[in-house]
């Protein structure tokens, strides 16, 4: 199938122009569950998971997918697809971001197929898999951007990429259930504590208005729900329905009060917001709990906590741990899938394979690694162009730039031993010549 069989046999071409008659697909409804239906708890959880996905995918994009033929690096069609343009609608960054997203959000993992018509690499949005023990797995109902593939794919025709623990997101979801309840409670407490609360003190002087019934223009008593209304009832209703609107608005206002009525701010002492319970209520408690959620998510994906939150302290050590325990396992899995599905055993044994360089994730300052580069060069490990390639600079189009040099301070052990024996013989010969004289 296309490049998957590039080194094996001719690709099999089939038509993909027919529209699907029956759309049978396995819908995970990821965006419906995690975006369209987000509430307070799932919003913070999605934020933490998306942070991890972005960190992993951004690091993977910086890796160099090197393709080798008989041990020599070449930049052909496979290299171009893996590093620049997997398909006409995605660049490499979008492609690998979607791969990582599917690996995390889909318990069955990400599925990458190659179009049997154009040879492009495509990431499935949903699919069904039928697993077997002694024959290849079968992938069907493959949906890509709302297009249902009408054919099934065997295991050797696809890349099936899964996290080491494919249920890491489910485990994080279960862990978050109780913690999310605490977070929702903290938000409710914050809103309750910062709500404006007043007490209306009614003194005896105002109570006397209960003895003054309201009458209409004809002198008839005014009734409400069959109850005689008084000036007391009218003043209280007007207070809550009209006058207090100005108090609770965000604009300047003046509210008239009858004798015997007094509004007291329950959130502050002496009617001043600078003191009392409302003065010390901040979002720090909520922020601390959100940090805990991010830390839990970082631990689940083996990402250093400080690196996920953008801390700069000990950035080198955190980057090393991130590459070693998070990126390298994912890169090795992708590398293995590419080699066994696109190249095959015979070609890999002949040093025709793909290699993912994760050391490209780091940003190197030429002035900081000058001493190390000079040491590697003078012992003959790298040529000048090797160093330039490592630094992502263009190579020098000269023969000398590809030559390996070695300092005269270094030599083989055998040569040193031979030189020592020759020196001893010369010394003995010199002593004999002196004695003869």
Image (cartoon, rainbow, N blue to C red):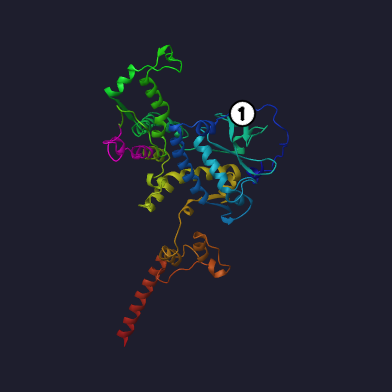
Q: Which residue is mark 1?
A: 25
Q: Nearer the viewer, residue 6 or 83?
A: 83
Residue in view at x 29 percent, y 41 percent: 274
Give the extent of the magenta segment. 266-290
Can residue 174 be seen in the rendering of this structure?
A: no
Left or right: residue 306 versus residue 148 is left
Residue in view at x 35 percent, y 21 percent: 232
State the image quarter where residue 96 is shown. top right
Question: Where does residue 286 sit, x and y in percent of width and height?
Answer: 36, 37
Give neighbour class at mark 1: few <14, some 14-19, many 20+ (Cα, 10 Å).
Answer: some
Question: Where does residue 76 sit, x and y in percent of width and height?
Answer: 63, 53
Q: Is residue 181 magenta?
A: no
Residue in view at x 52 percent, y 41 percent: 100
Question: Which residue is at the far top?
Answer: 226
Left or right: residue 151 versus residue 304 is right
Up the image or down, 122 lies above or below 397; here it is above
Q: Is residue 278 magenta?
A: yes
Q: Nearer the viewer, residue 286 or 44?
A: 286
């Amino acid at each position: 199938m296309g490049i998957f069989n590039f080194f094996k046999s001719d690709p099999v071409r089939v038509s993909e122009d027919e529209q699907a008659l029956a759309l049978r697909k396995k819908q995970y409804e990821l965006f419906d569950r995690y975006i369209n239906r987000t509430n307070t708890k799932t919003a913070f959880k999605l934020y933490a998971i998306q942070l991890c996905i972005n960190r992993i995918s951004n690091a993977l994009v910086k890796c160099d997918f090197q393709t080798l033929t008989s041990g020599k690096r070449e930049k052909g069609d496979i290299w171009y697809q893996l590093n620049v343009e997997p398909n006409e609608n995605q660049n490499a960054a979008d492609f690998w971001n979607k791969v990582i997203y599917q690996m995390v959000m889909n318990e069955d993992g990400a599925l990458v197929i190659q179009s049997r018509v154009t040879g492009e690499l495509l990431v499935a949005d949903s699919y069904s898999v039928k697993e077997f023990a002694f024959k290849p797995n079968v992938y069907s109902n493959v949906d890509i951007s709302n297009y249902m593939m009408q054919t099934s794919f065997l295991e050797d025709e696809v890349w099936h990429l899964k996290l080491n623990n494919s249920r890491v997101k489910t485990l994080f979801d279960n862990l978050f259930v109780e913690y999310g309840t605490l977070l929702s409670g903290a938000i409710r407490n914050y809103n309750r504590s910062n709500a404006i609360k007043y007490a209306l003190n009614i003194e005896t002087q105002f109570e006397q208005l209960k003895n003054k019934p309201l009458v209409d223009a004809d002198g008839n008593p005014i009734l409400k729900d069959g109850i005689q209304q008084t000036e007391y009832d009218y003043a209280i209703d007007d207070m809550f329905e009209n006058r207090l609107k100005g108090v609770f608005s965000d604009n300047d206002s003046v509210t008239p009060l009858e004798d015997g009525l007094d509004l007291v701010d329950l959130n502050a002492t002496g009617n001043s917001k600078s003191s009392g319970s409302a003065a010390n209520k901040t979002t720090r408690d909520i922020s601390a709990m959100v940090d805990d959620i991010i830390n839990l998510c970082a631990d689940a994906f083996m990402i250093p906590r400080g690196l996920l939150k953008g801390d700069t302290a000990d950035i080198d050590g955190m980057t090393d741990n991130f590459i070693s325990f998070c990126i390298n396992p994912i890169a090795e899995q992708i590398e293995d899938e590419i080699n066994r599905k696109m190249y095959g055993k015979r070609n890999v044994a002949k040093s025709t394979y793909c290699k993912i360089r994760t050391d490209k994730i780091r940003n190197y300052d030429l002035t900081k690694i000058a001493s190390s580069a000079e040491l590697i060069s003078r012992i003959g490990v790298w040529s000048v162009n090797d160093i330039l390639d490592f630094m992502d600079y263009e190579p020098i189009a000269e023969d000398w730039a590809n030559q390996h040099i070695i300092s005269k301070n270094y030599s083989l052990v055998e040569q040193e031993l031979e030189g020592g024996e020759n020196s001893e013989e010369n010394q003995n010969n010199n002593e004999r010549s002196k004695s003869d004289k």
